Image (cartoon, rainbow, N blue to C red):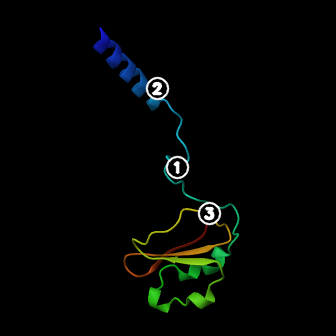
Amino acid sequence: MTDFRSLTAAALVAGLAACAPTTDADAPPAEVTTSEDSCGASGFQTLVGSSVGTLDPSTLPEPRRIIFPGQAVTMDLVAERLNVEIGADDQVDRVYCG
């Protein structure tokens, strides 16, 4: 009878753990969208499709981040930060705030 109680208790604990609410750390990162152009990304959309070799970081406003394929980046939202995403073909794929 003791083994049955142990199994029942273990199953109950496992079932309750599955019902626990998730935290933000458990959730997948959400796509960050800004309703306003807080970093001025709209003025840099002409960079999309250009070669990374022609990109001059000194012409971009601070704070800025140039993201290369496979590069680890933080998922924090900095609305004023300009992000320039480089594709696998060494061309600018995307320019956005965040």
Q: Quadrant of the N terminus?
A: top left
Question: Farthest residue toward the top?
Answer: 1
Distance of label 3 from label 1 (alpha carbons): 15 Å
Query: Looking at the image, is mark 3 or mark 2 nearer the viewer?
Result: 2
What's the mark number on residue 25? 1
Cα separation, mark 1 vs mark 2, equals 20 Å
- Disc 3 crowd rating (10 Å Cα; few below 14, some 14-19, many 20+) is few
- Residue receiving disc 2: 16
Q: Nearer the viewer, residue 15 or 60?
A: 15
Seen from the viewer's position, the closer of residues 84 and 16 is 16
Q: Nearer the viewer, mark 3 or mark 1?
A: 1
Is 4 left, or right, of 75 in this rendering? left
The correct choice, above or below, for 53 with respect to 90 in the image is below
At x 28% / y 15%, what residue is drawn?
3
| Mark toward the start of the polypeptide (3 vs 1) | 1
Residue 15, x across and y down, in percent? 42, 25
Residue occupying the point 55% across, 90% down: 56
Pointer 3 or 2: first along the chain: 2
Task: Please tell me whether residue 91 is drawn above or below residue 13 in the rendered image.
Answer: below
